[in-house]
């Protein structure tokens, strides 16, 4: 089991849904994908590199050859995969505190979903529906998503300074450099090993 | 398309795992043993397919029963779940997997129903696409930068922090010269390696800060002795 690779945690969960409810979830995701401001809370949480929800209809599990037995299922299933920074508890707590309305809109159609608030039954439900990762790779194991965003801001500012400072006198360059330092100073946090989790 | 967010593609594959009651080691166990032995740093096969941001492989044993009054049901096959986030298009990525890490891909997927192997590229791509499940909603926090751009930016960030720390007391002319030298060195630096924890890791500024703390402690000691 390797849910964790340095600073990133790989979470997998699967929940059953009655087939006719999946259309409601699809409609919600369509709206969420189309109206970008609705993703504001997800973006502002800023500790998720990548996340996805995948609906598998009960007759859509891959069937690749005749020897493979066909699935006979009553429920459609909602799969959730997330790549986030921090510990499982921090993640679920933050989800429950910040995204409770959105989470309820997504998971309330799953069987026996207790709601994302209060957090204790929510955590029990997630723990029941979660399955462990066997292999997990990340290209930047020491960097959180905030580190990545900050690094790109530094890179952009440095590129701009390089372009802007061509042909300038030393005094003019020093002024531009000071502005650059002021602009990037809050983006120079260290990357490195993850703190010991709780 | 929900499989894509900006320039990043989110691929989800579910491959049904073989069942063989006569096998000494069950196929799901064999996959798990293989995965347990795969490195997940810069030696990872996915570091070779360098457009991979993050990837996971999971054996899904069954669906979940959440209790009464819902119905209890079970899968007839276990599934190998492959979830990956990468730059570019699907065909290029699958082609790179088959060309650059064929041994690892075959070693894992040979335990799945109907797997044709990587030697027949067309059959391999067709098989993977047959096992693909379309993503319903995909979120990527940074979706407009490639893996290499991100690694380079992290390297730049560490280098800039160190440069600023070391050049605080320079005159304008010295600063300009040091900056030109710094940019030259940065451009010449070897490309960062995906999956390597050290690269883009703690910049040397950390050592300097410890030195500064030690220096402050020494100063206090001197004051006390005086």
Image (tube, grey):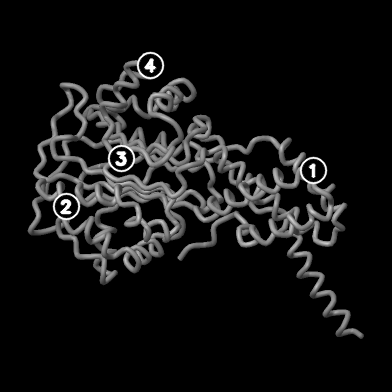
Q: Is B42 left, or right, of B118 in this rendering?
A: right
Query: Exactly how many numbered labels are in the figure?
Result: 4
Mark closer to the observer (3, 2): 3
Location of residue B225 by image quarter = bottom right
Could you say where residue A116 lies in the image, as x and y percent from the top left?
Answer: 26, 65
Q: Can you tell which of label 2 and label 4 is closer to the viewer? A: 4
Q: Kindly check if marks 4 and 1 are in contact, taking CB atoms under 8 A apart as contact.
A: no
Q: Is residue B3 left or right of residue A135?
A: left
Q: Are marks 3 and 4 on the same chain?
A: yes
Vertical placement of residue B88 versus B122, above or below: below
Numbered disc 4: what chain?
A: B
Identify the residue position indicated by label 3 in the image: B2
Residue designated by label 2:
B65
For disc 1, the marked residue is A167
Which part of the image, by quadrant, shows the N terminus of chain B? Answer: top left
Of helix, strand and loop, which one carries label 3? loop
Q: Residues within 10 Å of mark 4 (few under 14, many from 20)?
A: some
Q: Earlier in the sequence, mark 3 or mark 2?
A: 3
Q: Residue at x 37, y 50 (%)?
A: A82
**Mark 4 lies on residue:** B121
Q: Name the residue at 7% across, 58% down.
A: B69
């Amino acid at each position: 089991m390797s849910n964790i690779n340095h600073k990133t945690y790989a979470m997998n969960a699967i929940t059953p849904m009655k087939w006719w409810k999946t259309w409601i979830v699809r409609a919600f995701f369509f709206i969420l994908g189309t109206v970008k401001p609705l993703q504001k809370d997800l973006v502002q949480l800023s500790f998720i590199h990548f996340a996805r929800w995948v609906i598998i209809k009960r007759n859509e599990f891959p069937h690749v050859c005749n020897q493979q037995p066909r699935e006979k299922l009553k429920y459609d299933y909602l799969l959730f995969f997330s790549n986030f920074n921090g510990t499982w508890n921090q993640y679920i707590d933050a989800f429950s505190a910040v995204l409770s309305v959105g989470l309820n809109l997504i998971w309330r159609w799953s069987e026996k979903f207790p709601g994302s608030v209060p957090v204790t039954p929510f955590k029990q439900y997630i723990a029941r529906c979660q399955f462990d990762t066997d292999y997990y790779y990340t290209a930047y194991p020491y960097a959180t998503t905030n580190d990545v965003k900050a690094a790109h801001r530094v890179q952009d500012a440095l590129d701009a300074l390089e372009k802007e400072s061509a042909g300038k006198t030393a005094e003019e360059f020093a002024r531009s450099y000071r502005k650059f330092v002021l602009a990037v100073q809050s983006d120079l946090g260290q990357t490195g090993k993850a703190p010991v989790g709780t | 398309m929900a499989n894509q967010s900006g320039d990043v593609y989110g691929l989800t594959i579910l491959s049904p795992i073989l069942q063989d009651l006569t096998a000494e080691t069950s196929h799901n166990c064999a996959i798990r043993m293989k995965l347990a032995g795969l490195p997940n740093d810069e030696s990872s096969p996915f570091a070779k397919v360098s457009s991979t941001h993050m990837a996971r492989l999971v054996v899904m044993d069954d669906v979940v029963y959440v209790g009464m009054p819902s119905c209890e049901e079970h899968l007839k096959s276990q599934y190998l779940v492959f979830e990956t986030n990468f730059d570019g298009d699907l065909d290029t990525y699958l082609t790179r997997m088959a060309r650059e890490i064929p041994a690892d891909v075959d070693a894992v997927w040979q335990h799945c129903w109907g797997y044709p192997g990587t030697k027949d590229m067309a059959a391999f791509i067709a098989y993977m696409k047959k096992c693909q499940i379309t993503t319903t909603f995909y979120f990527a926090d940074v979706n407009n930068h490639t893996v290499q751009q991100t690694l380079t930016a992290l390297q730049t960030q560490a280098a800039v922090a160190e440069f600023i720390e070391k050049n605080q007391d320079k005159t304008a002319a010295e600063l300009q010269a040091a900056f030109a030298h710094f940019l030259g060195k940065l451009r010449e630096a070897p490309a960062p390696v995906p999956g390597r924890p050290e690269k883009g890791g703690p910049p040397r500024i950390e050592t300097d800060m410890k030195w500064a703390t030690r220096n402050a402690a020494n100063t206090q000691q001197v004051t006390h002795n005086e």
